[in-house]
Image (spheres, rainbow, N blue to C red):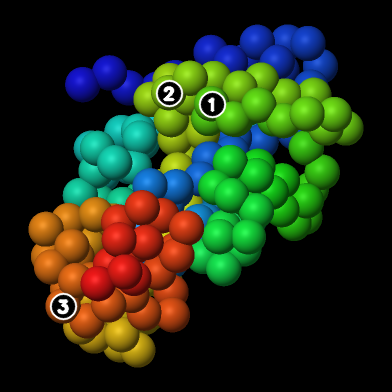
Amino acid sequence: MNYPNWQEEKELLKQNFQFIAGVDEVGRGAWAGPIVAAAVIFDQKFIYDNPQLIYNKFEITDSKKLTPKKREELFEFIIQKALAWQTAMISEKVIDQIGITQANILVMQNAIEKLPIKPDYILIDAIEFLDYPIPFKAIIKGDQKVYSIAAASIVAKVVRDRFLIQLHKQYPNYGFDQHKGYGTKKHYNSLHQYGPCEIHRKSYKPVKLACRL
């Protein structure tokens, strides 16, 4: 497994940037529920004192490569060690209204703007901003290459998963506590058996097809 590193952050620190935020989102491909973004800033001392970002023998990496239990542990570690962190959420209704690409950009910018410390540089997983007032770099597969982005991916994933587990109590027929709104066989079958519920993304093709049944 390839792990992230601090190379991007260290290069920016050498250029006298002080508050470097890693940003990522989760939930883009789900059929139901919101998308969630997180922004995380580590301070310079922490970056240089921790050449590998490891907790309890597990290195922080792309949240998709970690078990739910390990993500929860790393989430607690990240929010304790980060200089600043914040999350933002965009509902499925807004996604249906403005489209997933615009919602993706908006949720990331919302997370950045909610940070208690204004970043002077942003490292983003893949998404390009237009006319944004803070300099940034979009990095393909950034959550596999950059510690700050990987940390943001874990925070966003844990926050979204917890939210979907709560929604499962409201909509128990769909198994949101298991698949978190993504397209699994169980989700497909329940969608066709019960039809879409309030939190399904009506603009997504599998949900559209279920609406026509």
Element under label 1?
Answer: loop
Q: Name the disc covering residue 115, or none.
A: none
Q: Earlier in the sequence, mark 2 or mark 1?
A: 1
Q: Residue farthest to the bottom?
A: 170
Q: Name the disc covering residue 193, or none.
A: 3
Q: In which quarter of the image is residue 46?
A: top right
In the figure, is residue 127 to the left or right of 109? left
**Label 3 environment density (alpha carbons within 10 Å; few <14, some 14–19, many ≥20):** few
Front of the two marks 3 and 1: 3
Q: Quadrant of residue 102?
A: top right
Residue designated by label 2: 141
Q: Is residue 46 visible?
A: no
Q: Earlier in the sequence, mark 3 or mark 2?
A: 2
Q: Distance between the residues labelled 3 and 2?
A: 36 Å
**In what quadrant of the picture does the N terminus appear?**
top left
Residue name at image x 65 percent, y 10 percent: 11
In the figure, is residue 188 to the left or right of 202? left
Type of the residue with mark 2: Lys
* Residue 96, percent from left and from top: 56, 60
* Residue 4, percent from left and from top: 40, 22
In the figure, is residue 62 to the left or right of 119? left
* Residue 126, percent from left and from top: 53, 26
Q: Name the disc covering residue 126, or none.
A: 1
Element under label 2?
Answer: loop
Q: How far apart are marks 3 and 1 (CA)?
A: 36 Å
Residue name at image x 44 percent, y 63 percent: 201
* Residue 196, percent from left and from top: 33, 75
Front of the two marks 3 and 2: 3
